[in-house]
């Protein structure tokens, strides 16, 4: 008996590879989390960047709470079972009227996690509309053979390597429009993208990524995750500490090690794996 998702939602996820909207946070929580995010940004040189965009549940107490919230974990449990690790949290923030975009890609192409069961929960902390550059999904693409990606390193592409599926028929894409506080669930293999933000507000998305504990990281010898529900009988991931306060020194030290490993995985096989600037002078976006 599913805990949160009805037949329609589970059907959408199986057939299309995504489902929305589901409750993410309340509008009041969204405003509070945005305020805390923006206070951190103001104290740390502006828009969240680099390592701060990844595994931020180790830095912000409110996010450590959110990745463990029952109303988020119940739908995830309906999809991947009762034992759940949170592998990472990712920020996708587009400034007002900015050219930043996300090219068509499949997440399973480059994260090294040997599971089909990774679930992403994308939560809007501001309106995600066609105007502000909401996510776009290619229904059913998660059921097809993997699509070839090219590393473009294109300017303004928010993806680490600018990895891009070249031949997508945009007319088939579905806009994942979300109001502040709403969330979307999507599959590890779904092809997705988003256009630039043409609105006057920031488009702020925080994405929580969940896996079952039998998953292995095949692109690195060590990886970590937070055990957020149930048990881990496998031990493939070192369990992450829970920050007791914002920027808890123990969790910050762990974050440094864990985000460096994620950087290595994202850039595996590129010059950026070992250094932050390539021989032709291109700086790694993360
Ligand atoms: O937020 C976006 O526009 C893209 C998000 C994305 O690529 C992802 O969550 O995997």
Image (cartoon, rainbow, N blue to C red):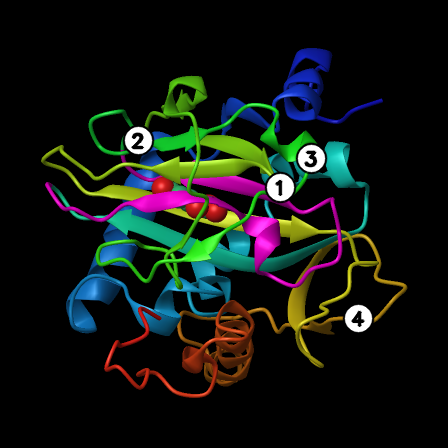
Which quarter of the rendered picture does the N terminus lie within? top right
Distance from the alpha carbon under mark 4 to that under mark 2: 35 Å
Is residue 229 rendered to the left or right of residue 35?
Answer: right
Q: Residue at x 27, y 34 (%)?
A: 133
Q: Earlier in the sequence, mark 1 or mark 2?
A: 2
At which x and y percent is residue 285? 31, 68
Residue annotated with mark 3: 74
Q: Residue at x 80, y 50 (%)?
A: 83
Residue pointed to by mark 2:
128
Q: Position of residue 99 (x, y in %)?
A: 16, 46
Real-space CA distance between mark 3 and mark 2, rounded to the nearest whole angstrom:
24 Å
Does residue 29 sit above or below 286 in this rendering? above
Question: In the shown orientation, is residue 12 left or right of residue 32?
Answer: right
Q: Which quadrant does the C terminus fall into?
A: bottom left
* Viewer-proximal residue among 105 and 186: 105
Residue extent of the magenta highlight: 97-126
Secondary structure under badge 2?
loop
**Sequence-earlier tag: 3 or 4:** 3
Q: In this figure, which residue is indicated by the disc labeled 1?
A: 189
First in sequence, mark 4 or 2: give its number: 2
* Mark 2 CB lies closer than 8 A to ligand 1: yes
Residue at x 41% of width, y 79% of height? 272
- Residue depth check, mark 3 versus mark 2: number of the one nearer the observer: 2
Per the image, label 4 sits on a secondary structure element best described as loop
Ligand number 1: quarter of image: top left
Above/below status of 149 relative to 251: above
Q: According to the image, label 4 marks what residue?
A: 236
Circle 3 packing at 10 Å, graded few (<14), some (14-19), many (20+), is some
Residue drawn at (49%, 62%) of the image: 57
Q: In the displayed structure, would residue 156 be above or below residue 5?
A: below
Foreground mark, 3 or 4, reads 4
Q: Is residue 181 visible?
A: no
């Amino acid at each position: 008996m599913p805990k949160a998702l009805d037949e329609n939602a589970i059907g959408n996820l199986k057939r299309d590879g995504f489902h929305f909207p589901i409750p993410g946070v309340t509008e009041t929580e969204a405003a509070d989390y945005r305020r805390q995010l923006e206070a951190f940004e103001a104290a740390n040189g502006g828009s969240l960047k680099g390592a701060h965009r990844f595994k931020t549940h180790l830095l912000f107490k409110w996010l450590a709470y959110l990745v463990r919230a029952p109303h988020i974990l119940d739908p995830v449990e309906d999809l991947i079972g009762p034992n759940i690790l949170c592998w990472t949290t990712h920020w996708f923030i587009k400034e007002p009227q900015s050219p930043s975009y996300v090219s068509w890609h499949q997440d399973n192409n480059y994260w090294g996690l040997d599971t089909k069961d990774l679930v992403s929960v994308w939560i809007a902390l501001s309106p995600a509309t066609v105007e502000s550059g909401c996510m776009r999904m290619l229904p059913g693409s998660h059921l097809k053979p993997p699509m070839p990606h090219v590393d473009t390193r294109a300017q303004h592409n928010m993806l680490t390597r600018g990895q891009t599926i070249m031949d997508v028929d945009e007319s088939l894409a579905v806009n994942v429009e979300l109001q502040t506080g709403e969330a979307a669930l999507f599959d590890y293999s779904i092809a997705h993208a988003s256009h630039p933000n043409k609105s006057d507000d920031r488009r702020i998305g925080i994405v929580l990524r969940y896996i079952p504990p039998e998953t292995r990281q095949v692109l690195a010898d060590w990886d970590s995750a937070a055990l957020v529900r149930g048990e881990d009988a496998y031990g493939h991931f070192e369990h992450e500490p829970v920050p007791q306060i914002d920027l808890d020194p123990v969790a910050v030290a762990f974050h440094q090690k864990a985000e460096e490993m994620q950087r290595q995985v994202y850039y595996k096989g590129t010059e950026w794996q070992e250094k932050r600037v390539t021989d032709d002078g291109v700086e790694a976006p993360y």
